Structures are given as C-alpha cells and as structure tokens.
Image (cartoon, rainbow, N blue to C red):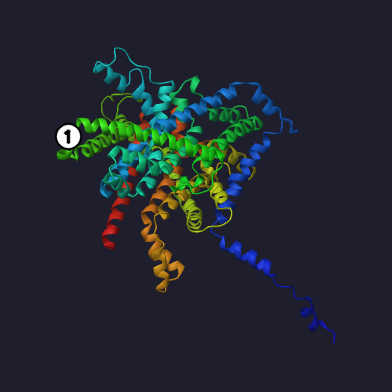
Amino acid sequence: MSGPASTPLAAAPAGPTAPQRSLLGRVSKLWPLLPAILFLGVFFAFPISTLLYLSFFDDSGAASLVNYQRLVSDDVYIKVLLITLKTAGWTTVFALIGAYPVAYLLATVKGSTRNSLAVWVLMPLWTSFLVRAFAWMVLLGRNGAINDLLMALGIVDMPLRMIYNFTGVMVGMVHCMLPLCVMTMLPTMENIDSNLVKAASTLGARRGEAFWRIYFPLSMPGVAAGGLLVFITSLGFFITPALLGGAGETMIVQLIIFQVNQMLNWGFAGAIAVLFLVTTLVIFFFYDQLVGLSTLSGSAHTGKRGIIGRLGAWLGNRVLGVLAVTCATVGRLLDAILPRPSQQKAPRAVSRGVLWFTALLVIVFLCVPAFFVVPVSFTQEAFLNWPPKGFTLKWYDMVFASHEWLAAIGRSFLIGILSAVCGMLIGVPVSFFIARNQFAGKSAVLAFVLSPIIIPHIIIAVSLFYLFSQISLVGTLTGMVIGHTVLTIPYVVITVMSVLKNYDVRLDQAAWTLGANRLKTLRYITLPIIRSGMIAAFMFAFIISFDELTIALFVTGGEVTTLPKMMWDDALLKVSPVLAAVASLLLLFMTALILLSEYFQRRGKRRAR
C-alpha cells in the first residue's frame, strides 16, 4: 500500500542515542556554570584575546613583530615593569604586616565588637580613591598636617619630604589595600578552632610558641590569598602613583593609557599589555604551585603540588621553624622576667594589650583621610588645605545645585546596584556548584571565573573599549554595567564560597528527609542561614563597582559620566573642596547603609531565637 499515510513512519527522525543522552545529561547538570562561562567568555576572554591579537600587526595592518621589537629595544619599558613589580611587592609586604593583627583581632573578639571594628576597617572603601589620594597630598605635604605636627613636637627641625616619591606612593597604596587584605584574611582566621591553641598550651607550649606553631600555619591560606589579591590589584594601580609619586614611580598601566589615549596605538598598547599579562600569569602560576588556587576562597590547599610547590612547602616549613624557635627563646626570656604561678594570666593580658594597641594604630591610619575630608568640606577657602579656614556650606550647596554632580551620583548608584545584582545572579550559582561538587576541570573553571581578579583592570578596560566601539556600546549604561559585572563576579564567588565552606550541609539533608524539595530547602534553610554572607557579597560587589574608575575612563566615552570619572576630571582641572563635600556625603550614606544592614541582621537573629 502506497500513499502519504505511510510516509511519516518511514521518515520519522531517530531519537538521541544513549551516548548523546548521557552527554546532554552531564551538560544539564552543569547549568549553574554556563551563565558565568558564557558571559565571561564573550565580555572578558574574547576582548582580551582581540587586544593581544592586535599586537602582532603593524600600523598598515600587516602581520609583524615590530611592536615587540620596539618593546625589547627600549629598556624603559622593562624598567617601568620592574618599578611596577617593586611597588606592588612592597605594598603587599606592608599591607600583610598591617592587616594581620587587625584580622587576628577581628577573628578573636566577640561578634558585636567585631562588627563595630569592621565598620572602621571598611571606612576607606566608602571614600573615593581620588579623595583619599588628595587627602594624603595635603597631609603629607611640606606644609601638611603631619609635618606641622612633627615640627610642633620638636621631632624634626625642618619639613620631611613625604610626597612625590616612593614614600608617598607606599602610604597611599597601603592605605587603599589594607581593607581588602584584612577582609580576605578574616574568613580563614574565623575558621581556625581556638581549642587547638589551648590544647597546645595544656601540653606545655608557651603562648607565643603555640601561636607560631599552630595558629600561624593554619592562617597561611588566608595570608596567601590576601597577598595575591593585594599584589595583583596593586599592579593595576595608576591613580595613587600618578598623584603621590614622581617620575621614578611610573607604573606600567600609565604607559598603556598613554598609548591608547594619546597615541591611539592599539598594537603597541597590546604589546605592553602582553608583557604585563605574561608577568602576571607567571606570578600567578608560582602562587598556584606554592599554596594552591583554592586559598582564594579561604580554603586550605589540598591539590597535588609540583616540584615548585614542594620546594615552597619545604622553605615555608623552615621559615615557620625559625619563627617558632625565635618565639620559644623570647618566651623563655619572658619566663625569667615575669612571675609565673601567681600571675599566670599576665602574659596573656600583655599580649592582648599589644594586639589591641597595634590593631588600633592600623585602624587610625585607615580612618585618618576620612576624618580629614569631612572638616575640609566646610572650609571657606577655594582649595583643599589644612587646617580648614572658617565654616561654610557653600560646597554642599554647589553639589546639590549641580545637575552634573547629581546625575553622576545617581548614575553611579544605579550602575553599582545593577552590577552587583548581575554579579550575584551569575556568581552565586557558580559558588554553590563549585563548593558542593567534584567534577573534572574544577580547578580550571575556578581559575577562569576568578581570572578578572588576576588580569589587571587596565587590560580589561582597554579590551572592552575596543570591543564596545565595534558594537556601539561605548558611552552607554549597558556597556558600563557589563564592564563592572565582569569585575564583580569573582568577588561574589570568593565571598560566597568562603561562607559555604562553613555551612553544615546536614541541615539541608535533614530538610530533604522531612519532605522539602531542593528549592524550598534553598529558600527556607540555606539562604536564611547564609544571609549575612550574601549581604556581604552584594555590598562588596556594589563597592567595587561604585568606586571603579579604570573601566569608566574608557567605556564611558565622555557621555555616561560616573561619579569616579567626574571626580577624576574635576581633580585634574582643580582641587576644590567640592570633592571633599561629595566624599563626605558618600561617607555619611555608606555608614548609614552599613549600620542599617547591621540593624536588620541583628533584628532577624533576635526573631529567629
């Protein structure tokens, strides 16, 4: 029998085979990773690859290595790279030294005290990089507040030179990096069981020896993660060195900006970026070999180490051993001086007092520019100076009467909120999946998701500018949100993974056994418990976006001006107290926001009880 009725049966398409169904099943299980991989692939990996690709062509468009020949033939670029590495290295050393006692104090005090101290530690993040740099310019200047104080106390006979040199750059950069370093170390230190140190003490170890042999090695993942984030972030700095340093403190980022903005030489800018990127990746490779990529989320390194990692572990154990022996020697000397049985708590009281004193000194250092900015915003003079002269509100009136300032502030808040929301929507599923699953290529996926932190922001900004110029996204709100979301995703992933590391999954399992599905368990069990960590991730992403200048310098195109971009432009033309007024308003708003968030968290905990 022939006819159309028999045709469909003969032509029916075959269904997916068993291997195809298996592949589809594995891909469907990876859906939490797909948005992040696609987004970062399109707006991060592709534009950077394009910029690096351009470096292999000359001005006529022909394939050539002329840009790299120029890079190698002139030793100025290698010198600037070495200056950049030296500046970032010393910034990391000083930031780690200053951040460790603060993070240790925060990790070992009560919750209410910790929250109060954290507000002061995070205060620099609520003041623009630009305003902080200008505050240090006035404080460290020849006739600045610090020199005036030193001369009044008779410590020096003539003003010290603390600005437009390496000292000024160190002060400004360490001040910017300390909060990031503290908050990166803190999750690891909070997870260390205090009973371990107590157990060592009961077994005869002195307090200092117990700290160096037990607590300090356990805190090293947080120290390593904080050091890497500070180092990589410092490599991409250009605001602070440009304002507080001299010609001898030129950073390589400034050369890239000059080639793009002034010379319009994309090929040579790409070649410098390649040199910069290769150096950064080599450093990151050694970091991964020594301590492991997982430490960026506050976890200990559990992966396999190569010969470099084993060598680093051996060297680290030798250093810790020397510290322990030194501490034991100091402990014996203290035992010989201090009475023992009748005043057993004296060493502990002394050590806690020294810790508090040291940490408070660091916190005062963090708060100095903010305390300086507020009084200066009321000065009657037309420029930033200390001490402020008179009292006036005209600078605040100028801010509220200016459509440009209000529009920039509103636009920055909008971009910050949208970028933080997008970062949470993309980053949180990735965090849950990586933290709770073992799968092939897990380390590679984590490295890719965190790579916007590893790659200096200037390379991301220039790459996005080139891409957006091809698709008409320069000078648009969409382009700004996309660029900022690229930067916020890794910070969200790190923060949420650190929170999930301490989450007891047996709570979820108990909910499942009682009949709750995964969605209800997530909504009623998981998210309420980790709510404070989620809020912290959102706030972190918002602050990163709100104060981001590098992306704004390129992607705004002079049309969608954000607050950091407007402050930068205004600062280049004049240094007026309007900047201080804007910074004071932001400081007030951010403080109120943090305190309100803390109030609702405490209220929620009381209701939960």
User: Is residue 220 or residue 333 the one in the foreground?
Assistant: 333
Query: Helix or strand or loop: what does disc 1 sit on?
Result: loop
Q: Position of residue 436 (x, y in %)?
A: 48, 58
Relative to 303, is 208 on the left or the right?
left
The amino acid sitting under disc 1 is Pro
Query: Which residue is pictured at 49% across the width and 23% down the height?
Result: 249
Q: Compared to 74, does 464 lie above or below?
A: below
Q: Nearer the viewer, residue 572 or 53?
A: 53
Q: Residue furthest front?
A: 204
Residue 142: image x %, image y %?
Answer: 35, 17
Asked whether residue 426 appears in the rendered view, the answer is: yes
- State the image quarter where residue 377 is shown: top left
Q: Is residue 72 above or below residue 585?
A: above
The quarter of the image holding the N terminus is bottom right
Q: Is residue 322 left or right of residue 423?
A: left
Side of 176 where 437 appears, left or right: right
Residue 558 visible at all: no
| Tally of numbered tags | 1
Query: Which image quadrant is residue 146 in?
Result: top left
Q: Which residue is mark 1?
A: 339
Residue found at the very far right of the displayed protein: 2
| Residue reaching furthest to the top | 157
* Residue found at x 52% / y 35%: 553
Instruction: Return the x and y of residue 189 as percentages of the image width and height.
Output: 36, 45
What residue sits 67% from the left and 28% below the top? 68
Instruction: Estimate the x, y position of residue 562 in percent, counting from the top left.
Output: 47, 40
The quadrant the C terminus occupies is: bottom left
